[in-house]
Image (tube, rainbow, N blue to C red):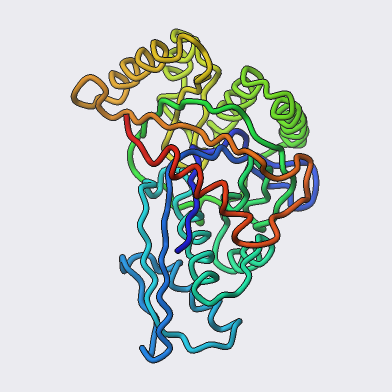
Amino acid sequence: MGSAFGTFGELLQGELPEHDGDFLVTLPVARWTMAAFRWDPGAGDLAVRPAQKTKALRLARMILEEERLPAGGLVTVSSVIPEGKGLASSSADLVATARAVGHALGTPMPAARIERLLARIEPTDGVLYPAIVAFHHRTVRLRAVLGALPAMGVVGIDEGGAVDTVAFNRVPKPYTAADRHEYARLLGRLTDAVRRRDLAEVGRVATRSALKNQRLRHKPSLERMREVCREVGGLGVAVGHSGTTLGVLLDTRDPAYTHRVTAAAQACAELAGGGGPYGGVAVYRTLSFRNTLRPGGPARPQGVAEAERPVVRAFSDHGPTHQ
């Protein structure tokens, strides 16, 4: 077995004034992909369920080839992360699959190896690290470990449709030199905010990133979501920069959290046009990792168990929930 969490879009995504400057900062949430691998060298070939999870199948085949083992067996992928919405569903599928295959074969599957394998398949989110990280998603490379934050609630909506992340990342981005320098400043602000556990500043940076992303992937609901955020006393707005989701960030430690999340869900339901009191709205909880990677990395988990331990604990404690 192997597992991986998803994200609610990104806290920040853009391009820095350097070579290979495309980057994002992850926002891990309690939504999960679980993968299972049963190696059967006598089967003659590999199969995957569901059949459309072809990237997971390709990854399993690549690992077996590296290990010089017969390509036979079954990969099974089960996920509660919606696809094509900017929630890192594909990245979670692949990371969970790599861990499952590593467990089944008894072979180490450290982060560096997973990165190298995934770089041959597609741009990838940084969900293999149990922390908030800055990640070069196009080249699949860790930039820095920022650390962990207190848990936040995210009241989210989906504007509909789906985005092909691979195609999105192939499109040239019209960033100016001024844009790149602003993204560098935003990354510095966010790095300091995570270190200080300053959720208000995290929300401000996330909102600014969402606004800057409008010319790349316009979200018609963004301005209304900002209004909802102000009305309910939220921290800011986070989006799937290459997806269709938007969400209001809320501090779960706030004594008025229950009131704020209810008010936000009611307002978002009207915006989403769904049925029922909270139709079309999902409430997520961000992951707050304990005993995780050292901030300011390049520190990496050295093996599968170390990388997955916080994931398994969080899954058993919080589980995937919809409110």
The front one of 264 and 120 is 264
Quadrant of the image occupied by residue 257:
top left
Rendered location of residue 317, percent (x, y): 45, 39
Quadrant of the image occupied by residue 25:
top right
Query: Quarter holding the C terminus?
Result: top left
The front one of 245 and 221 is 245
What residue is shown at x 74% (from left), y 29% (from top)? 195
| For residue 115, side relative to residue 272 (left or right) | right
Rendered location of residue 302, percent (x, y): 70, 60
Q: Establish if 125 lies above or below 49.
A: above
What residue is shown at x 75% (from left), y 39% (from top)? 295
Q: Establish if 14 lies above or below 323.
A: below
What residue is shown at x 47% (from left), y 15% (from top)? 229
| For residue 86, side relative to residue 188 (left or right) | left
Q: How many numbered dots are placed on residues in this image?
A: 0
The front one of 224 and 249 is 249
